[in-house]
Amino acid sequence: MAEKSNETRRPVVVVDGVHIIYKVFASGRRATKGASVGSRKFSRRLGLREVHAVKGLTFTVYEGESIGIIGSNGSGKSSLMRAIAGLSPIQGGAVYASAKPALLGVGAVLLPNLSGEKNILLGGLAMGFARKEMVENTDAITKFAGLEDFIELPMRTYSSGMSARLRFAIAASRDHEILIIDEALAVGDQEFRNRSEARMREMRDNAGTVFLVSHSMKSILDTCTRVIWIEKGELIMDGEPQAVVDAYNKHTGSTTID
């Protein structure tokens, strides 16, 4: 089936000239010429430093799109996603969304002293599920995450990969109008990644919009209908996935899509 043009699709996220600036406390030492350790000629430099993480980004995202967000470490990808989700303030421009975006990231909180099963229940309640629905969905979520043998154990006994798989399984147990996934597919074996990518495509086909932040170009190409490349907070390229990934790989000198 042919994809609808942007003119016939409903915009769900508009990023309009967004700037994100962090103020961080910087400290260090500067040695004057001829100084030695312990000398008064060492002076300590203290103060606030501004980090301009996102610099005037503008783009529109439409319903049913899967948007890959790529760029080198520190390029502003995660800062932008947190701003779209309403979790970080912006210092210029605006973000408009048709529904509250749900952010699934590697830092999503699960309670370490509770079992995986109880975290499924709490996570579902936080997303608006009724308790009865989550009880009914627990087995399916557990199976999706591949944690059948561990679900009754406390979360503190899980590896980081197990925790990340469970976070994704909880978030993916319902359809979201706007779902943001920040590096969540970088964990688990290929079988889990295949399940995750299939679920993302299913959510997209149900008129949901998915953002995927990833360093795996294979996941980006397998999942996304559009790719946005950001470097040093600036928009470098926005378009068809293969074209953007090829340009990014040329820029980085990469010869692999993994």
Image (spheres, rainbow, N blue to C red):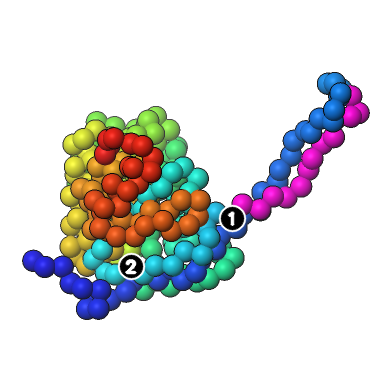
Residue drawn at x 53%, y 60% is 55
Residue nearest the viewer, comparing 85 with 215:
215
- Tag 1: amino acid: His
Residue nearest the viewer, comparing 16 with 131:
16
Q: Residue furthest bottom?
A: 8
Measuring from the top left, give residue 29's x and y in whole percent. Answer: 78, 33
Residue nearest the viewer, comparing 64 with 19:
19
- Tag 2: amino acid: Val
**Residue 72 placement: quadrant:** top left
Say the numbered circle drawn on residue 61.
Answer: 2
Measuring from the top left, give residue 232's x and y in whole percent. Answer: 50, 51
Q: CA distance from mark 2 to mark 1?
A: 23 Å
Report the residue marked by disc 1: 52
Instruction: Determine whether the residue tagged by mark 2 lies in a helix, strand or loop.
Output: strand
Q: Nearer the viewer, mark 2 or mark 1?
A: 1
Measuring from the top left, give residue 248's x and y in whole percent. Answer: 35, 46
Q: Is residue 121 above or below residue 29?
A: below
Query: In the image, which residues are magenta?
Result: 39-51
Q: Residue furthest right?
A: 40
Drawn side of residue 199 relative to residue 69, left or right: left
**Residue 179 placement: quadrant:** bottom left
Q: In the rendered structure, which disc, 2 or 1, sits on the residue that comes first in sequence?
A: 1
Looking at the rendering, in which quadrant would you find the N terminus?
A: bottom left
